[in-house]
Amino acid sequence: MATTAQSQAPTAARGAPRAQRWRPYQIAFWLVCLAAVIAFPLVISDPAITTVAFFTLVFAAAGSAWNIFCGYTGYIALGHAVFFGTGCYALTIICARWHIAGGWAPFEFVPLAGLIAAVVAVPVGLVALRTRRHTFVVITIAIFFIFQLLAENNIFGLTNGMTGAELPIPPWSGYVYNLPFYYVILVILLLAVGTSWFVRHSKYGLELLAIRDDEGRALGLGVHTTRVKLSAFVLSAFFVGMCGAVWAYYVESVFPPFAFDALFDVLIALMAFLGGLGTISGPLLGALLLEPAQQYLTIAVGQNGLNLVVEGLVFLAVILLLPEGIVPAVSNRLFGRSAARSATPVAPGPAGPAGAPGSTEAQSPTTDPGSVMAER
Amino acid sequence: MSLVLQGIVTGILTGGVYALMAAGLTLVFGVMDIINIAQGAFVILGAYLSYALATHFHVDLFLGLFITIPVMFVLGVILEWTLIRPLKRDRTQLSILVTYAIAIITEGLLYFFFSADTIKLFAWYTTQSVHVFSFYLPDIYLMAFGLSALLLGALYLLLYRTKFGRSVRAMMQNRAAALLIGIDVERVAALTFGVGVALTAAGGMAYGATTAFNPNSHYDLISRLLVIIIFAGMGSLGGALIASVGMLVIENLTTLLLSPTWASTVFYVLLVFILIVRPQGLFGKADARSQ
């Protein structure tokens, strides 16, 4: 935290006027984006394209949610498919047990499915967050495989094993089928991005960033690290669970290898890395670039496995050539922070220095790290 | 009683094969502080290499190892050199993503060249079995165990009787100090990664001869291997051997006495308990590397 404050003080002074000049354009840009996303399926009604748009929004929402925990704390979790799958199965089981008919009704239970995923995240987080860094990554992967195995073996009689389970069939057909799903996932996406923005601009968000910069020092400064980490973990699981629930209702049936998909873990991480880990817009940009490409590849060369090769190569290229991601790279150019950045001591965290996402936001008085430090 | 004995014996024999794969994984972790998620994919690649040699060139599975082990060694060194060494900042976490990508690429290539069909390595001795005590034991289990024991012995000699091994152990203890006393850490890291990958050639052959596999099997393998090295404590070679055998014995006993459904679950549940009590694993050093 102290590192953040010291390194940002001069930067803020230099970057502030330029950043503030950009602010109206930035707001206008976001409003145009929002309008475009809302209008998109109405203008282009081809179901083949709106399907891709739907999946893109699912990944954008899941990526934003993943970023709330992983981007801000610097803990790379490669097991969020656990919560995606839990959301899938939660909605499936709710619909089956309570005899929910197809239509709008299953959507009402999406938040409940997210809540169930969040509840599952509590013990998972308690176990995994006892460790740090690479041990944490490995443990999230191991826990993911435990859940996949539980689902495959139908351990508690909940998942119906490899036979899969059916959801209610939505009554919409043809050209309008995608629309309800599209707007529901859009609402979830907006909630996830809003939460991400809110967290980033709160004292709570600063505590998360402090953990990323130096966990030991954050603890020393009075951040309740365990509580803060666990709550962010659970928060991200909640949104990922809701994404899973909507996704499951969309595809109408769930199977363990698709609900608990190892590729999902990597894809959301890749999207966040490509866009910019720890930035608000990074996961959105990453999903927008990668998910359509991924859908195209699966259709074009999916049957002989070459889609995996291309995805892996893109992944390698992103990590090796652009480890900080597109958004921080571009915002450095725009606001000329690269000089200050290279002088910033980078604490062991995978992302760039704290404040990179908030190149424009970090200047508001309430969230200036310096002012929080002063209050303490 | 005979079931218990059978479970223990087959558990120890197949556990030896897992020990070989886990040894490579934990060795690379100890020296380079990275986790090679592609280890499972390399095992499957090794199995497919043996398969290709056996079907296209009629090379015996065990003789084929004289080709596949050097090939995998060179592959490992090249991958370390081109993909892992360039990671300057936060190599530990980024390397997990890089090796994950390598695993996905390997899986895709194997799908492309060998299709998704499930296969098993075959030779005249893979169908033989011997009668011991009161049950039949496939010959190949004994041979795979022998191979693993031989290679683990060779690994022991490499680590404890050569200058290279001394460098490796020095780096496992303290990388910075190893650099200061004049060890070429980058070279040792590349060679260690090569050795770790080379072990998967033999591990893959033994795995492929005892278990049916397809390109997708690497997920199952890497999850088991990760569980083994977390259970043992990451970076602990001896621990990895004990954990491998322990895991497979528990799995086999559960399969035979309870039901196959619960086999791996029991071990995973055990893992979670261990993590709650000892986050650093059974034989791991307390938080030595957690920063």
Image (cartoon, rainbow, N blue to C red):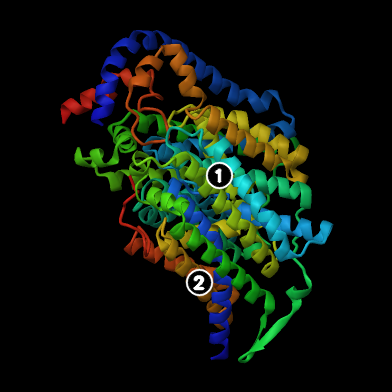
> In the visual, does A138 lie left or right of A288?
left
Residue flagged by tag 1: what amino acid is it? Answer: Thr
Give yes or no for contact between labels 1 and 2 (Cβ–Cβ under 8 Å). Answer: no
Residue flagged by tag 2: what amino acid is it? Answer: Val
In this view, the residue in front, B174 or A342, is: B174
In this view, the residue in front, A19 or A314, is: A314
On screen, residue B43 above or below B90: below
Mark 1 and mark 2: span between their CA atoms? 26 Å
> In the visual, does A308 lie left or right of A349?
right
| Label 2 chain ID | B
> Residue B196: horizontal and vertical position, in percent?
54, 53
On screen, residue A349 above or below A262: above
Residue at 31% over, 38% down: A211
> Residue B35: horizontal and vertical position, in percent?
48, 49
Label placed on residue B111: none
In this view, the residue in front, A327 or B31, is: B31
Which residue lies under the disc numbered 2?
A: B245
Q: Quadrant of the N terminus of chain A?
A: top left
Label placed on residue B99: 1
Of mark 1 and mark 2, the one earlier in the sequence is 1
Tags 1 and 2 both on a single chain: yes
On screen, residue B3 above or below A250: below
Residue at 57% over, 87% down: B3
